Image (cartoon, rainbow, N blue to C red):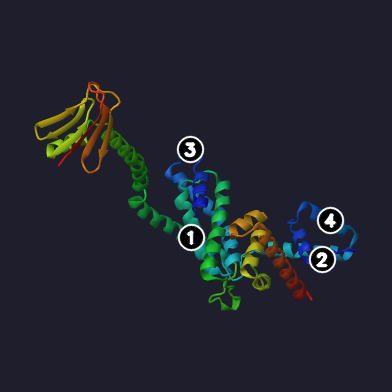
Amino acid sequence: MRHPNETDLALYAGRELGWFERRRVARHLTECALCRREAEAFGAARAELAASAVEIPAEVNWGRLAAEMRANIHVGLAAGECVGSAEVEPWPFFRRAAATVVPVALLLLAGWWLQSDRPHPAEMAAEEGVVLRATSEGIELREGGRLLSLQNHDSQDVTYTVSMQGAIRARYVDSETGQVTINHVYAQ
Amino acid sequence: MVTVLEDLRIAMSEAAEPTIHEGAERQNRFIAENLRRVFLMIYRMVGNVADAQDLTQEVFIKCLQRGGQLRDAEKAAHWLSRIATNTAIDFLRRNRRASFTEIDEVAEPLTSQFDSPEQSVLRSERRAYIDDGLRLLTERERLALLLRDVDGLPAEEVARQLGCSKATVRSHIANARIKFRRYVERRRS
């Protein structure tokens, strides 16, 4: 006969074994008086511990201790109310409101800024210096109030190339001559 | 801990708004109904009266400060137990071990006004006998045993409160029962 080990019997006493293990140990206990006594001893020790747990320690005068604790709890609560009413109450509401309103306001502000009719960067630059611009008519060169334009309005399939050095190139087939024409304008 | 206190707040605010006087009355009743149970629960874990007294007061103040009005007393008592266990475990983690006070060391031994001297001696001996047995266990074994066998928490809940797996808790519980049972048998023989 294979006996359950001591750990299994200890866990059996508190019903912590799984269903299958519990059945196996229970079946064994019906046949084995030795193991049954062991399991009963675990049960008795558990009961003894649980029974002692409801007893107030012998050195304690419970009436006096309880009264002292009750008084201290009330003092603690009163002290907490003094601190809490000044600081704790208003802030959670304010923080929650601010956490909701601020992101919404930022979102609206960003939307307005992106949608607003602001001056085009090129136009802004025109007020400051030379501006080169490709239009549907051709290439424009502006400086202050003066304008120079190189037109290619009759031509189709014009390819514009813009370089970072401040130049625009228009490449197209001239409708009058049939020649491939390249206008390359540099701004200085 | 924050979650437990939040749940307690919800448990305590599920009915109509009482007057200040009714609120104070409920608060007093709540303390009276649970004080002994919570004190004993903490005392068994920390092992001495002075620390148990401080922690019990702390637990009630925490609960009542966050709980506001006491409406569902049963739920509130449940959360109170959880806060008590967590508070005691935190205390033991900070102090690393429980210190079981010897009865001889108590400066002013006090007896219950309802006990005869004989009853008092018997109670004292019995308490010391149980405390000696608990002292043989490691801190984790003692906590697991008390939470499971005395407070009646399921093993899963014990594992959650101790921050370990269910298998580890089962091992702690089994070891604790074996040690405690051997102690009981040794003392009887």
Can marks 1 and 3 be said to lie on one chain? yes
- Kindly report which numbered mark, 3 or 4, lies closer to the viewer in this rendering: 4
Q: Chain of mark 4?
A: A
**Residue B58 tag number:** 1
User: Circle 2 sits on which residue?
Assistant: A38
Look at label 1 and name its amino acid.
Glu
Say what secondary structure mark 1 lies in: helix
**Residue A161 coordinates in the image, percent (x, y):** 27, 36
Q: Secondary structure at mark 4?
A: helix
In three-dimensional space, the C-alpha distance between marks 1 and 4, rounded to whole angstroms, equals 46 Å
B159 and A73: which is toward the camera: B159
Alpha carbon of mark 1 to alpha carbon of mark 2: how far?
42 Å
- Residue at the spot 56% in from the left edge and 61% down from the top edge: B39
In front of the other: label 3 or label 2?
2
Q: Residues within 10 Å of mark 1 (few under 14, many from 20)?
A: some
**Chain ID for label 2?**
A
Depth check, mark 1 against mark 4: the one in front is 4
Q: Which mark is residue A63?
A: none
Q: Position of residue B95 (x, y in %)?
A: 52, 70
Q: Earlier in the sequence, mark 2 or mark 4?
A: 4
Q: Which residue is mark 4?
A: A24
Q: Chain of mark 3?
A: B
| Type of amino acid under label 3 | Ala
The furthest residue to the left? A145
Amino acid type of the residue tagged 4 in the rendering: Arg
Classify 10 Å Cα crowding around label 3: few (below 14), some (14-19), many (20 and above).
few
User: Crowding near pointer 4: few (<14 within 10 Å), some, many (20+)?
Assistant: few
From the image, tell me which residue sits under label 3: B16
The answer as to whether the residues below labels 3 and 4 share one chain is no
Relative to B131, A70 lies left or right: left
Q: Secondary structure at mark 2?
A: helix
Asked whether residue B168 appears in the rendered view, the answer is yes
